Image (cartoon, rainbow, N blue to C red):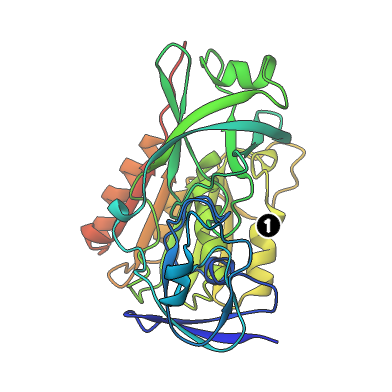
């Protein structure tokens, strides 16, 4: 049996299933409530239950005292609805509302997505969770003080493991380690989240999502978040790559488009290989957008990839009517050893 939960003062509503915490239900449906450890220990998700009853679950006494329970307070990471609820909680709005943390993470899994791309799965300590907006990035902190930035490929509601898409850059100080010496159970340290590349949910404009290569990673997170939030805005995904093998998770956006009428997916190859048997679009990916949308004044664009792609897209989209303030970008840069 599910219960309806209303968040004040925003008035947003969502449903919670039986045996599902308030926080998990909110995150599953794309609502950004404050939280920290998700284990009842830190108190970051504490808020007031204005109406209705909850089971406090595994809330720890030092984070939620008996007096606070009597006053109607609850830890949303532990509390489960026993009726329809009205709760008081500040929904996160500005980036500054999300704390930036420095944390260790253990490599849980390597998954080879393409000959030169791996998906790195990172597990945080049991008492920690990273709160972030879909599309943001983290900085991997190297032992010599340097850092390398990678976008998060997972959505915030799916945060048990952090996902990074890493392309092998020959001579790259960090990526050489990833592809040669790094192994499961190694410990990395990172700082984050960072960046302003995230979906502006207050807008109702249709969205063009432009990815080049592993720029697909934050686009994946944004789309998965939009699906979880039941976003009905048109989402048009363009993914540009050199050859078919470089569309390393091609079935994923194909499935999004097949399952959601508001999502379209257009892959574009710049140099299809002889054996690709490619019958789709070819050329530069941002030029495919220009051909399909001669008038861009009513759209938002989110672009992620190589700086040369970002610069060309910004220039040409604005020339084709896109308001400059509706172009959001995350250019990928690479550092050699």
Find residue 246 and report its image quarter: top right
Residue tagged by mark 1? 252
Left/right of residue 81 with respect to residue 251 in the rendered view: left
Q: Which residue is at a point 58% across and 39% down the rendered structure image?
A: 164
Q: Which residue is at a point 77% across and 38% down the rendered structure image?
A: 275
* Residue 136 image position (x, y, % from top left): 43, 47
Left/right of residue 13 with respect to residue 296 in the rendered view: right
Q: Nearer the viewer, residue 321 or 190?
A: 190
**Res. 313 visible in picture:** no
Q: Nearer the viewer, residue 219 or 101?
A: 101
**Res. 185 visible in picture:** yes
Identity of the residue furthest to the front in this view: 67
Figure check: 192 above or below 160: above
Q: Say which element carries label 1.
A: helix
* Residue 201 image position (x, y, % from top left): 37, 69
Figure check: 295 above or below 196: below
Left/right of residue 28 with respect to residue 185 in the rendered view: left
């Amino acid at each position: 049996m599910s219960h309806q939960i209303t968040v004040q003062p925003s008035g947003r509503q969502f449903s919670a299933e039986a045996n599902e915490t308030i926080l998990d239900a909110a995150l599953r449906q794309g609502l950004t409530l404050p939280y920290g450890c998700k284990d009842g220990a830190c108190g970051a998700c504490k808020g007031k239950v204005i109406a209705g009853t909850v089971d406090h679950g595994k809330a720890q006494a030092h984070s939620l005292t008996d007096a606070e329970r009597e006053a109607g307070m609850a830890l949303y990471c532990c509390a489960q609805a026993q009726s329809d609820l009205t709760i008081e909680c500040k929904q996160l709005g500005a980036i500054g509302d999300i704390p930036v943390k420095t944390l260790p993470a253990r490599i849980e899994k390597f998954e080879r997505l393409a000959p030169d791309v791996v998906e790195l799965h990172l597990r945080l300590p049991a008492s920690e969770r990273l709160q972030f907006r879909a599309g943001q990035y983290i900085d991997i902190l190297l032992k010599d003080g340097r850092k390398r930035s990678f976008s998060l490929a997972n959505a915030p509601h799916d945060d048990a493991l952090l996902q990074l898409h890493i392309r092998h850059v020959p001579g790259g100080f960090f990526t050489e380690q990833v592809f040669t010496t790094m192994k499961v159970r190694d410990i990395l340290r990172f700082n984050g989240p960072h960046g302003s590349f995230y979906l502006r949910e207050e807008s109702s404009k249709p969205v063009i999502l432009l990815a080049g290569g592993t720029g697909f990673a934050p686009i994946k997170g944004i789309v998965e978040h939009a699906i979880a939030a039941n976003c009905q805005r048109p989402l048009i995904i363009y993914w540009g790559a050199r050859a078919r093998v470089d569309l390393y998770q091609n079935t994923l956006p194909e499935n999004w488009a097949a399952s959601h009428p508001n999502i379209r997916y257009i892959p574009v190859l710049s140099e299809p290989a002889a054996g690709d048997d490619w019958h789709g679009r070819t050329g530069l990916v941002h030029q495919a957008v220009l051909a399909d949308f001669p008038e861009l004044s009513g759209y938002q664009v989110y672009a992620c990839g190589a700086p040369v792609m970002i610069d060309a897209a910004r220039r040409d989209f604005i020339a084709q009517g896109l308001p400059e303030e509706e172009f959001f970008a995350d250019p990928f840069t690479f550092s050699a050893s």
